[in-house]
Image (cartoon, grey):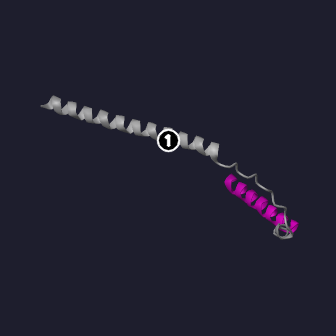
Amino acid sequence: MEESLLQEGLDLMLFGMLTVVLFLALLVLATSALSAAVRRFAPPAPAPIAAPRSDAAAATDPSPAVVAAITAAIVRHRHATARRKEGP
């Protein structure tokens, strides 16, 4: 009885694994076919158009004084962090 139960378990496992493998193979084939169809029949994507910068975009740029202040703050922070790592 044990041998037939083991055989049934192996048969069921083999059937399940084959079902999964066949489903995945079918999925790969369907995805490949759909991808090929889209590449063949879809219209080409339009080229991106670079929009010229407007005065509003230029006005949002930080001023040189703000850039200098941020740079000085970063340098000061890095210097203080390095000093703390060195110890007293």
Q: Position of residue 34 (x, y in %)?
A: 55, 44
Q: Which residues are magenta?
A: 63-88
Q: Position of residue 13 (x, y in %)?
A: 29, 35
* Quadrant hosting residue 62: bottom right
The answer, for residue 87, to whether it is visible in the render is: no
Mark 1: which amino acid? Ala
Q: Nearer the viewer, residue 57 or 52?
A: 52
Secondary structure of residue under mark 1:
helix
Q: Residue 70 colored magenta?
A: yes
Magenta: main secondary structure equals helix
Q: Nearer the viewer, residue 5 or 33?
A: 33
Q: Measured along the vertical axis of the image, is residue 61 above or below residue 36?
A: below
Q: Is residue 35 left or right of residue 43?
A: left
Q: Measured along the vertical axis of the image, is residue 53 above or below residue 39?
A: below
Count of picture labels:
1
* Quadrant hosting residue 82: bottom right
Q: Is residue 81 left or right of residue 36?
A: right
